[in-house]
Amino acid sequence: MNKYITIGIILVVVLAGGILYRTYLLPESSKPVSTGKVREITITAEKNEWRFAPDTIEIERGDLVKMTAINEDDYDHGIAIDAFGISQRMPANSTITFEFVATQAGDFQYYCSVPCGEGETEGEHRTHFDMIGTITVKDVVKTE
């Protein structure tokens, strides 16, 4: 048999298996959800504070999140949310925007992804590793 026919048959079988899985076997908790809500959230890397404000955010699974990140410092920061594939550099004294859909429920950290030093703020020693926040994604409750 021709190798291209064999590759074509394998491709069709894999594609059909994926469609069948997604249609009939995917658990309800893993199915894509869209609430239709657009959440606009602003996070600020406060000047010489080594922290993000706010450090906790609550949204619902399926929300489209339009996030604005403001860097008030004179040096670069970054923002990363591993669960949603976000990693953005925040140049000094700038504002960036990005968006993502909250596809899974749970508590997820966001953090500074660019080493940015350390210092004293309000008598407390803080470092790059203290720039952590939490996004709580609540599962959508269906009403029937």
Image (spheres, rainbow, N blue to C red):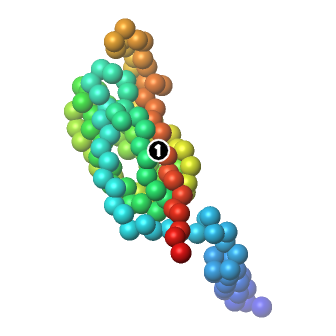
For residue 99, above or below residue 71: below
Residue 49 visible (yes or no): yes
**Residue toward you, 49 or 114:** 49
Quadrant for residue 124, please give it: top left
Q: Is residue 97 above or below residue 25?
A: above
Look at the numbered disc 1 and give the secondary structure of its residue. strand
Label 1 crowding class (10 Å Cα cut-off): few <14, some 14-19, many 20+? Answer: some
Q: Residue furthest top?
A: 123
Residue 113, position as x, y percentages in the image = 44, 35
For residue 11, say whether it is visible.
Answer: no
Farthest-out residue, front: 144
Where does residue 94 sit, x and y in percent of width and height?
22, 38
Q: Residue at x 27, y 38 (%)?
A: 70
Displayed quadrant of residue 63: bottom left
Q: Nearer the viewer, residue 130 or 105?
A: 105
Identity of the residue drawn at 38% across and 44% down: 88
Front-lying residue, 93 or 53: 53
Query: Where does residue 74 sit, x and y in percent of width and height?
Result: 24, 25
In-image side of 21 versus 37 (left or right)? right
Residue bearing mark 1: 135
Q: Is residue 28 above or below residue 5?
A: above
Drawn side of residue 75 relative to residue 28, left or right: left
Amino acid type, callout 1: Ile
Closer-to-camera residue (141/137): 141
Name the residue: 46% across, 24% down: 130
